[in-house]
Image (cartoon, rainbow, N blue to C red):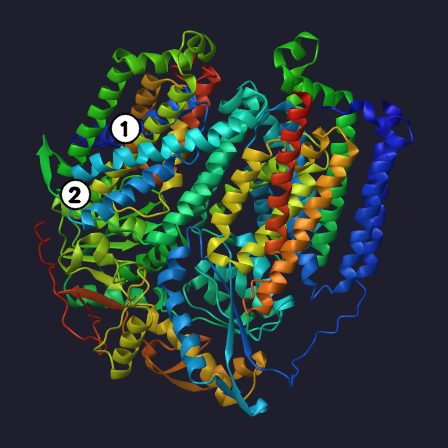
Amino acid sequence: MITVLNIIITGLIMGGIYALISMGLSLQYGVAKILNVSHGEFIMIAAMLTWVFVGLGIHPLLALVLCCPFTFCVGFLLHITIFRWLNINSGTAAAYESNAMLLCFGLYFIFSNIAMQIWGSNPVGFQFMEKSVNLGGAIIAVNKIIVLIIALAVSILFYLFLSHSRLGKSIRAASQDPVAAGMLGMNIKKIMAICFGIGAVLAGIAGTLISMYSQVNTGMGMGYTMIALIVVVLGGMGSIPGSMIGGMILGFVGSIFGYIEPSLSMVAYYLIILVLLLVKPKGLMGR
Amino acid sequence: MSKKSFLSLFLVFALILSLGAVSTVSVQAAESESGYTIDPDKTEILVGAVRSQTGVFAMFDQTAFGPCYRMWVDKVNADGGIYVEEYGKKLPIKLIVYDDTSDMNQMTQLYQKLILEDHVDFLLPPVSTAFLSAAVPIASQYGYLMIGAEGGSDTLKESLAKYPGFFSVLNYSETQIPAIVDLLLEQGMESAYIIYIQDTHGIEYSTAAEPAFKEAGIEIKAMTSVPADIADMTPIVTDAMNSGADVLIMFAYPQINYPAISIAKTLGYNPKMIIMGPGGSFESAKAALGGDAGVEGIIFEGAWNTKSSPEAAQFAKDLAEFNKDDPNFGMDWWGHIVYYASLEVLQQAIEGAGTLDNSVLAEYIKNNHFNVSMGEIWFENQEIAHECFLGDLGQWQNGYPEVVDADEDRTADPIVPKPEWAAE
Amino acid sequence: MNRSNGGGSRIGQYIIPIIIIAVLFGLSFLTRTGTSMRPSYIVVLFVSILNYIVLAVSWNIFSGPSGYIALSTAAFFGLGIYVSALFGESLPLPVLMILAGAISFVIAAIIGVITLRLRGVYFTIFTFGLVLLLQYLILWYEVKFNNLRGRTVASVPYNTVFLSLLVLVGIVLLAAYFVRKSRFGMALSGIGECEDAAAHVGVNTTMVKVIAFAATSFAIGAAGAAKATTMIYIDPPIAFNVMMSFMPVLMVIFGGAGTFLGPIIGAIAFTILQEQLTTKWPKWYMIIFGTVMIISIVFLPKGLVGTIGEMKSMQKKIALLGITAGFMLIGFGFTQILEAAGVSIGGLVFPLLFGIAGFVIFANVFKRHKGKEAA
């Protein structure tokens, strides 16, 4: 019984982080049409920055806030420069999509290696709330509970932002029908750049949260990119609720396999996708 | 359509046949293996290495063997070089380092380049046991010495006889498992929980531990294998906690060890003893785990320290001094002195045998004793003899890496049971 | 874009294949520069180049015209590597290559039947996941049941590997050439332009896709088996290295997707650039490589060959090639000057980087120029 409780709570925590990571990627693909395989590098950069900030005596929660404008600017600037040039130079939408993915692969090379030149590749970490509480027999780390709360809060806030705010509505309109949205007077280019920036922010928040409960290093990015890709395919490209559900599913699967056979969790993720895509070729919530 | 495909098929066959003919012709004997020659115009000793400067293994070149060979080359050249008798003068070292980007394809290709194009005199080993396993056959195919650094394993040991130019230096499961058993028995530990990484290191250590523990009467509560990129160690650490084992042993790398320690701390799980694999001996472990207090009482595979001998103390001082500007550098209280010894052995062999001929040097290394930073060492079956090592297990005590083997290498008594985790 | 009308006369059709065979035949004499015990380094380097040519050209046969971006190259390459690791002791290299190819073919056909109904990015990620699935599954199996992680591969002399790959390259290039001209190739590019329309006209799209996917995987598996013998020691992460999925794609994009020469030029240029950077500028390889990649994707979306092909006038084509050669010469001179000044970053780093820079700049200048003319 305690094991079941443990599995559920661990699953929730992993799921929360996975959902956060994947929402960013899903937004970037859904609106800006960029399959960002350098997504994990934004996670890594924010995590390393948090570690640097904490070393300077800044509280991790404050670092979380400090990292947001930074990651947003990096994402936004990348989009209004190289991605826009790419868009102009690529003839068709399909060509842009595949070129953008490869371009992100180049960004992955550059980001991960610049980070490695700066910070080396040793794992680093700081101590944040290394205590635990007893929840009905399951012993849970306080820092992870805080991380889960923040992750869920950010996810819900983000969802509310998309569904209720003016900008959020424009973003949804742009993702559903960019041409029509453009005709209605929306600045599609700006919206796309903002979306790419927001995606980077969500990755950055995830990175800071990860650094709160685990050691981080400059090579951590790719692993999270793969998780995010799996979740996004599972949930349906461009669907934010899909990413949340997909993230939770993956979190629970990961948690269950953590107790049964940890080495098979990647295999399990993949088999889930395999079965799901056979039934629904566009993911759970795909259109 | 059928005519066309017939024609293209014909072309393909023509190609295969012609190339086949060429290949049979080109296997003509003319295999004149270029033996060792003395080049009177030689002004320097070329030493080549393929090291992972980027990618997942870059950490090792930054912190493990990297600082050692860089200091060695610097020291030798500051001294004017290595005296080689057959040249009658000191020859400085020219070091060529290529980056394999942590990729096996690149690694093997670039060693071929060092040998076939750069005609280096000596090779330094690549990063990691897996890469070493591939580099050793290449080196020995061309008659080169390969004195290993990072990496040592039973699998490599089996191949020692096949590769006469290969010498393994680092101590591994063969000597460390008995050391662990001795320590556990001495301290009256009765049960252990073993976590091991799905890597040569983890597999060999756990395979060696199973019968050794059984024979010593130490109960193994569980042996859990984990993938290198496991997402969350919590379930496994919780399982270890619930098992009630006296000792938690982790035959794993930092990406597993460090999170596991953090989680154990968070959960308030404090077994009587924690033994940690690679990474535990790194000074940089403190940065990841919360300073001196964060690693207090943790036992690690290693080990040596500045109390082991005056030479070791001097070496530690020199190495720290040489690398003081490198932010990634941190002492490794397991490998550094052994890696450096491998370079000192090479240097002393060249001076002693008076030649750069790799095959002569291999014989020389097999048959002689060397005086290096870790004391007098010699090789038995192409491995450093066990009694030469300064220790097999260390323990962090007040931020100092004490050697705690249950034999004469010990520099301080182990603190058992491990003290409570320091409060934040 | 599809120059299917270029093949004019019946004899003209066979000029390029004959050139290919002649060049490869000429290359085979490279083995004479060394012995089988001590090959020359040029042969070692060519093994890498030929290997990447097989991967890039194979990828381009299927993904170039069809628009399905497959990232499964590393999966079939890894399967080939494992075939060599398991049977290398007992079987000669050509048999190993055929066996590896056959296994890859069968698995690719099965995967293809299941997954090719997925479109766009779903297909891409699914094929990428295949690499990871095989990697983790084999690792788990090896650790659990064989209590080992890595395996030793029986080594084969470089000259033999070189010749075997040369034959494979020949087959792949001829296949690439003839597929482009054939109805099969037309069907593939029809799928790329509009799959529904192609299906409507009566093309059995699934059949075409599965055959193309499986056939190209055959070549990739065979290349893996050949390359494995030079790797000597492998384990699942080494064999199923995700970079092997991305590198061929980058080479093709750099050279020009959908063109015949593009993948070959991309493979040669990238392999040499990689070799030069890792040996001359070890720490900066990834950063420079990434930058070159980004610049070429952003400013040459059609790739080297595609960009030249787009230019209407012959003068411009020649001028662009001439300027590139000029830049390479300047780069060479720059290296010499540096060398004289005591900085030895020799080799081909600067010529290659300068050449790429010159090509990118002037290709875009010419394009602007044309735009003005039109206006």
Q: Is residue C6 above or below residue A283?
A: below
Residue C34's disc number: none
Callout 1 amino acid: Gly
Q: CA distance from mark 2 to mark 1?
A: 25 Å
Image coordinates of residue A168 in percent, x first then y, are: 30, 15
Q: Residue at x 54, y 90 (%)?
A: B89
**Circle 1 SS class:** helix
On the rendered structure, is C337 left or right of B34? left
Judging depth in this view, the residue of A162 and B300 nearest the camera is A162
Q: Residues within 10 Å of mark 2 (few under 14, many from 20)?
A: few
| Left or right: C264 as drawn, with respect to A203 | right
Q: Disc 2 vs disc 1: Cβ atoms closer than 8 Å?
A: no
The residue that appears at 60% across and 69% down in the rendered structure is: C340
| Between A24 and B364, the one nearer to me in the picture | A24
**Tags 2 and 1 on a common chain:** no
Relative to A282, is A66 above or below? below
Amino acid type for the residue under numbered disc 2: Asn
Residue A274 higher or lower than B142, as above or below: above
Horizontal and vertical percent position of residue B2: 86, 24
Where residue B46 sits, quadrant-wise, is bottom right
Image quadrant where one finds the N terminus of chain A: top left
Q: Mark 2 falls within which chain?
A: B
Q: Is residue B372 visible?
A: yes
Location of the C terminus of chain A (image quadrant): top left
The image quadrant that residue C333 belongs to is bottom right
Residue named by callout 2: B242
Q: Which residue is mark 1?
A: A15
